[in-house]
Image (spheres, rainbow, N blue to C red):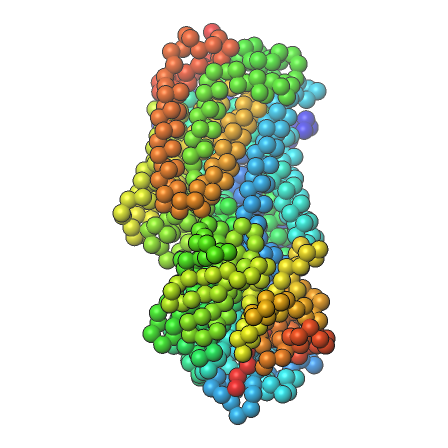
Amino acid sequence: MYVADSRSSKAPAAPAASRPGRREAAAEPAPGTRAARAAVPGTVLALGTVSLVTDVSSEMVSAVLPLYLLTGLGLSPLGFGLLDGIQNGFSALVRLAGGHLADRRGRDGAPRHKAVAAIGYGLSALCKPLLLLVHTVPLIGAVLAVDRTGKGLRTAPRDAMISLATEPAHRGRAFGVHRAMDTAGALLGPLTAFLVLRTAGGPLLADGGQQHGYQAVFAVSACVAVMGVLVLLLFVPNRRAADDPGTAHDPGAADGPGTAAAPHTADGPPRLRDGLALLRLPNLRRLTLCAVLLGFTTVSDSFLYLLVQRRLGLGTEYFPLLPLGTAAAFLLLAVPLGALADRIGRRRLFLAGHGLLLLAYGLLLSPFGGLPAVVCVLVLHGAFYASTDGVLAAAAADAVPAGQRGAGLALVGTGQALARFACSLAFGALWSAVGGTAALAWSAAALACCAAGAAYVLREQPTAPAAPAAPAATRTAEAATAPATPGPTDPEVPS
Amino acid sequence: MTTAPLRNRTRVLILLAAVVLLGAVGTGAVRYAADRSADRDRARPGGPVVTRGAVSLRAPASRELVFRNMAWGPHRDEIATVPAEHPDGPRTASGVHCLRFHAAAGTGICLQAERGALQDTYRAVVLDDHLRELRSYPAAGIPTRSRVSPSGHLAAWTVFVSGDSYAGTDFSTRTSIVDVRDGNLRDNLETFDLVKDGRPYRAPDVNIWGVTFADDDVFYATAATGGRTYLVRGDLGARTLTTLHQNVECPSLSPDGTRIAYKKRVPGASEDAPWRLYVLDLATMAETATAEQRNIDDQAVWSGGADLLYALPGDFGADLWTVPADGTGAARRLLDAAVAPAYLG
């Protein structure tokens, strides 16, 4: 017990606030363990595992899909990028529906985050065995569309569950842990796919006929996807009516009865209109505006890698490694930067992350070249993701009342995704008009302007003038002081 | 979703059972696929006879056909020859593995896969007349087309560059040309100036593939941009590509330099099988449909000036078929279990 005792003495206040405590409390773990779990709740670890496993499954398929379509089905490479973009936009819109549905309450009065997420993960899992059965391009397109629908549905309820399971003071780190696990899955997926192909006889090339390897990849991917759904159903606790505001009073919960101030009435289910009415919350409105503004100037990954390869003179054989570089940096930095966000303020780190992206653009435009420059750009790009992706969700969670967390997170996420989609189209057009380097220079200038604008919009607000309708006024100020004493009382409860 | 909460031990047991069950299903699927793949290393009764022997690319005594042997057995995927007059005869396998191959005037271009620990890498290898490696270049993706110029001085190849695993489905092609005499490599034809409909044209989505050589300076290829494909005439010295005609993919220039065989995307055909084999007269730009009515996804090869040779999916991956270039006659199967042919002599 010596170790446990010494650990528990370092964080004496934490156990009382242990959020997903139902399971742990039943098992009566040592106090030290409970302190550690309070920082990263079991729900977050469980959801991280679900994301990791699901990403292994989906990235397995995306890694071999181009090969399969080209060599197995003789599809032309043209038009595929556009199809991909349209499906991504569609997925972003479905996310709004997912967030809204998740906030609606079941007959027992509890929100349905887990149910909606399970349907989302389930839809995508269902698509993998379907890939074994469909062999024409339109049908494969349809299956992929259903897969994206599942992804769109699950994203907002999943992030809502992460935010609701975590004390506000630790949300940055919790999202960091989730994104790191998610990215680990994205890295493991292609490796698994190629191991399966290797074992099953290797990918056979543009000669038609032999597709056993691909079938094996789809089959294994389906098994992995089912595991993901199962982990979700078994290990992510259901939110009960008593956990949530508006239906019960549970002062010990991290998200106490704060919904009285939300735009919808506490008794009725949130209506679709209430989703947009969320924009009346000043903090959410500001955050959404900034996410959209900055999304407009975030050059899509594919374009960035293309520029890295061309501007920095990288051999084309290394091109497939570029996304891995970004992902590795994202994986390593997600947790430390998430924790940093908890200390210095999420909105501040979100802005700083775009500063890192601006640095990456600058390095690409500078006369520097060669391997060191490539590594720097990729590390900056990964750090940009680590300081914006989960951090934005954490910041958005601060600004939305618990009862509409799903819809609120979806709003910010969808705004950002659609803005990035628009940026992709615009950047492509700009590239054809003035060339890649000039297009990047314009984007860098636009990003600098938008970041300055966002910094102004997100500047520290005095608590008082922020509309009383927003219970989560300035989260950054609280976040800066909170980690030292994560007390059992919820800072989100207006007193 | 509002079932009675399960006990922790029950959850873990369910999970373990699922891991065992799904693990078994996954392992079974992989082993089944591996078994089916391993079949390809065992010769099939009734298949062509393949024996190991010396293969030379230098003009043989009588005309020969060289190709990648796809027949199941120990010499699968090796470059092999048969007498052009007896395509059903015994095959001579060289021991050299290539995914794509072409040869002319004693020079061969071979696109190979090198098995890595986790992922295949690809390279383009220039071979001398005894199939010995002269030079090799790393290739950024899966090989698709290869050609040697009639003089044997230039070699061209196209690979699919699959982009990033993040975006998943983005990919494009990359085409390179090398002078085998001095190793002068044009790594990416997309850097050439493109003149489209008489005007300089730039776009990020330009893709070039499927080179066919006229001589050591002029070649033809496919250029794609904005969802359309074009026949382009390339000038190696001037580093330019000029569009000549629309809806042309994988051109193949006739030996006399007057016609181009190509795959044309025909309207009304199913989206995953849209290509038919056509011949374009370069003087009049008149298009002639060949008698082959099936979907063709290959860069055809001219057999003399009258017939075309191309691959179609078959029982062992691919078979070679032939059809007259002038639109008459009918398609007939020339060779089982073969792909990427070239004539020697």
Residue shown at 51% from the left, 82% from the top: B94
Please say if B6 is above or below A403: below
Q: Is residue A435 above or below residue B280?
A: above
The image shows residue A181 at horizontal and vertical percentages of 47, 39
Is residue B79 visible in the rendered structure shown here?
Answer: yes
At 32% from the left and 38% from the top, the residue drawn is A359
Left or right of A150, for residue A491: left
Q: Depth check: B122 or A221 in front?
A: B122
Please state the horizontal and vertical placement of residue B147, each as a whole percent of the image: 49, 72
Q: Which is nearer the eye, B312 or A385? A: B312
Residue in view at x 55 percent, y 74 percent: B258
Q: Residue at x 48, y 20 (%)?
A: A284
How far across and how far down the image is residue A119, in percent? 65, 35
The location of residue A282, given as percent across then percent down, is 47, 16
Seen as rendered, the residue at the extreme left is A367
- Hey, which residue is sitting farthest front in the picture? B284
Look at the image and tell me in which quarter the N terminus of chain A lies. Answer: top left
Depth check: B132 or A426 in front? A426
